[in-house]
Structure formats: C-alpha cells, structure tokens
Image (cartoon, grey):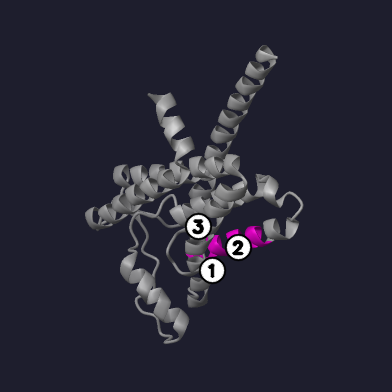
Amino acid sequence: MITQVKKWVTDHPVWFAILFFIFYFTGFFTLEHLVTEPVYLLHCGLDDLIPFNEWFIFPYASWFVLIPWALITLLLFDRKNYFYLCGVMFSGMALCLLLYLIFPNGVDLRPQSIESNNLAATFVRMIWSADTSTNVCPSIHVASTFAIFLAVQRSRIWKHRKLVVGICGVLTVMICLSTLFLKQHSVIDVVCGIALSTALHFVFRRTGEREQAVLCRLGENEG
C-alpha cells in the first residue's frame, strides 16, 4: 500500500500538491470556525518590545507568492528537492493543524484599532478580517517559509547562484519578522515554527539518504 502511494505521488506530483492544499485550506478554515476562543493564550516579554507596523504587510503577503514560486521551480528543475520540500512543508502544515486541534491556542496582541489609513493599513485590515488571532503556534507562515529556504539552500539549481539564495534568506527573515510586527504571532510561535521545520528537515534528509543508499546497493548488485 505504501509503495503504491509513493508511486502515485511520484507519477502525479502536481495533483499531490493540489490535493494537499485542498485538504489544508479545508482544515484551516474549519478550525478557524471551530476554535473561536483559544484555550491557551501565548505571550512573552519580547512581544511587548515589538511595535506594530502596518508596512510589514508586504513581506507578509509575499508568502503567497513564495510558495508557488518554490514549488513550481523545483518541480520543473529539481524534482528530488521538490519532493523534499513537499515532505517538510506539507508535513509541517498538517502537524500544525493537528496541534491547533489538540491545543487550541491564540494571541491577544493586536492593537484595538489601526490609526493609519494608508494602503498598508487597508491590507492589514483585510488580512485580520480573514485570519483571526487563533491557531497560531507553531506559525504555519514561519514553518513553511523556513522549509522553502532550506529547500532553496540545498537545491542544485542555485548552487552557483548565491544571490538567489541570499535574497531568499533575506525574504525569509522579513516574513518571520512581519508576523511579529503585524501582531499576528508571538515570538513563541515563530521559534516553534522554525524548530518544527528544522526537525522535519532532518527526518526527510535522512529518509532521502536511506533511499539513495538502497538504490546504490541495488545498482552495485545489478552490476
């Protein structure tokens, strides 16, 4: 059964991603309606030192471009790291949804109102109306962004294009900071998001190494 599933995923990489995102968005918005009052409110002293800044909505929103860019580019030019990214990022997203269900959590960091009436403030109000302060730890925004950075850093596509890796690194930092300056997340959520993707990185890296070793042994035996 597991072998058949792996074969289907390998043969249908695009459908695999599409089906996962259907599952993810269904699960996320279902939890948004189910968990309206978090049981656990997250907060730490560092949160109080970070001011609200609506202009961070732009790096925050770049997440919605970063994900398809990384998936499509790796799918076309580095299939191995495409599946690595799917493994780390999709597992992280699914685990976050499970943790939100088991430990309903949230933050109470948003200002009561946004005084500015500029374009950035308008976008922030739109995001806040669709995305509540519940289901925050670990941060999916952070975990998936960090997973993409890890995939970009290890991909052969950008082995000699350090500028792309550097830009992705800066964007990763800006997206993580944006979740804090927009008061979407606590520092705790950000740290947990990075830790989650780091742990999954080692899991999927070792899995890939084992599979590669098996293929090498099979090749030697055939030779």
| Cβ–Cβ under 8 Å for marks 2 and 1 | yes
Which quadrant would the N terminus be assigned to in this image? top left
Write the residue at 39% across / 55% down: 136
Q: 183 or 60: which is nearer to us? A: 60
Give SS at disc 1. Answer: helix
Residue 142 lies left or right of residue 159; in this view the side is left
- Other-residue count near label 1 (Cα within 10 Å), few / some / many at <14 / 14–19 / ≥20: some
- Other-residue count near label 3 (Cα within 10 Å), few / some / many at <14 / 14–19 / ≥20: few
Count of all numbered marks drawn on residues in the image: 3
Q: Is residue 219 magenta?
A: no
Q: Which residue is mark 2?
A: 171
Classify 67 as above or below 4: below
Which quadrant would the C terminus be assigned to in this image? top right
Classify 3 as above or below 62: above
Q: Is residue 169 magenta?
A: yes
Q: 194 or 208: which is nearer to us? A: 208
Q: Which residue is mark 1?
A: 59
Residue 135 spot, x, y in % from top left: 35, 54
Write the residue at 51% across / 63% down: 65
- Nearest-to-viewer mark from 3 and 1: 3
Give SS at disc 2. Answer: helix
Residue 204 spot, x, y in % from top left: 55, 34
| Cβ–Cβ under 8 Å for marks 3 and 2 | no
Most common secondary structure along the magenta stretch:
helix
Q: Which residue is mark 3?
A: 68
Residue 172 spot, x, y in % from top left: 59, 59
Classify 218 as above or below 109: above
Give SS at disc 3. Answer: helix
Q: Which residues are magenta?
A: 167-179
C-alpha separation, residue under disc 3 versus residue under disc 2? 15 Å
